[in-house]
């Protein structure tokens, strides 16, 4: 049998239903946020402007405001700001340091790729977020990137393979300021 229904029971039941619906909506939004943060390359919407094969410089627009701006699955170690030891997670990219360069300068990087990873090495304009880069396969190679316009640039690295990559990046001059 049970007790008779009172007028307040219906109000309480509606409040309980509303609370459960709100909790479910928060859980769904939280799960979506976790998925988006765990899949930056799927969520990124950078637009490639021109690409050249055979060791020529690539120019692309960088994706906007994703966690790719920070190494989450990797590290950068250096004692002198010039010889960098980098570990970068699979399918991850990073940009770091801010360096002023002048149009017509050529930025050179010596790359020693310790893993069999396809790497993209270059510079990214702070003002336009455009990336100027070259692809480096396994082994050692010197990458030369002509600076397209006066301004501040960040060093850009990307691991195109699904496995983590280890490589050395030796700059033509030391980074004076912080890496981040």
Image (spheres, helix red, strand yellow):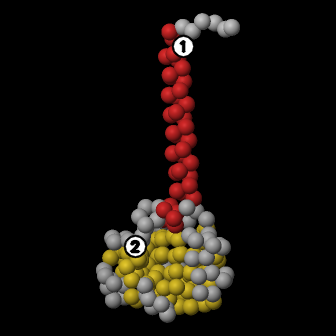
Where in the figure is residue 134, as x and y percent of width and height? 48, 85
Measured along the vertical axis of the image, is residue 72 above or below residue 172?
A: above
Q: Nearer the viewer, residue 130 or 17?
A: 17
Q: Nearer the viewer, residue 90 or 6?
A: 6
Q: Earlier in the sequence, mark 1 or mark 2?
A: 1
Element type at marker 1?
Answer: helix
Q: Is residue 44 something one can see in this rendering? A: yes
How many circles with numbers are drawn on the protein? 2
Q: Which mark is residue 47?
A: 2
Label 1: few (<14), some (14–19) or many (≥20) C-alpha neighbours in 10 Å: few
Residue at 67% across, 81% down: 115
State the residue lying farthest toward the right: 1
Q: Is residue 167 left or right of residue 109?
A: right
Where in the figure is residue 98, as x and y percent of width and height? 42, 72
Element type at marker 2?
Answer: loop
Q: Is residue 76 something one can see in this rendering? A: no
Where in the figure is residue 55, as x and y percent of width and height? 49, 91
Viewport quadrant of the N terminus: top right
Residue at 62% across, 69% down: 89
State the residue lying farthest toward the front: 1
Q: Is residue 77 left or right of residue 153?
A: right
**How far apart are the alpha carbons under marks 1 and 2?**
57 Å
Residue at 48% across, 75% down: 156
Of circles 1 and 2, the one toward us is 1
Where in the figure is residue 102, as x and y percent of width and height? 33, 83
State the residue lying farthest toward the bottom: 54
Label 2: few (<14), some (14–19) or many (≥20) C-alpha neighbours in 10 Å: few
Q: Is residue 43 left or right of residue 106?
A: right
Q: Mark 1 sits on what residue?
A: 9
Q: Which mark is residue 146?
A: none
Residue at 53% across, 71% down: 93
Q: Nearer the viewer, residue 17 or 120?
A: 17
């Amino acid at each position: 049998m049970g007790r008779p229904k009172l007028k307040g029971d219906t109000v309480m039941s509606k409040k309980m239903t509303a609370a459960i619906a709100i909790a479910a909506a928060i859980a769904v939004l939280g799960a979506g946020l976790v998925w988006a943060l765990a899949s930056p390359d799927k969520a990124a919407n950078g637009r490639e402007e021109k690409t050249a094969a055979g060791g020529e410089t690539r120019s692309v627009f960088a994706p906007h405001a994703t966690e790719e701006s920070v190494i989450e699955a990797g590290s950068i170690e250096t004692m002198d700001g010039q010889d960098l030891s980098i570990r970068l997670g699979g399918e991850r990219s990073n940009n770091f340091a801010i360096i002023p360069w002048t149009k017509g300068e050529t930025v050179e990087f010596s790359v020693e790729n310790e893993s069999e990873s396809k790497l993209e090495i270059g510079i990214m304009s702070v003002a336009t977020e455009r990336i100027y880069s070259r692809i480096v396969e396994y082994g050692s190679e010197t990458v030369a990137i002509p600076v397209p316009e006066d301004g501040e640039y960040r060093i850009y690295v990307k691991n195109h393979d699904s496995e983590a990559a280890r490589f050395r990046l030796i700059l033509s001059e030391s980074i004076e300021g912080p890496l981040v």
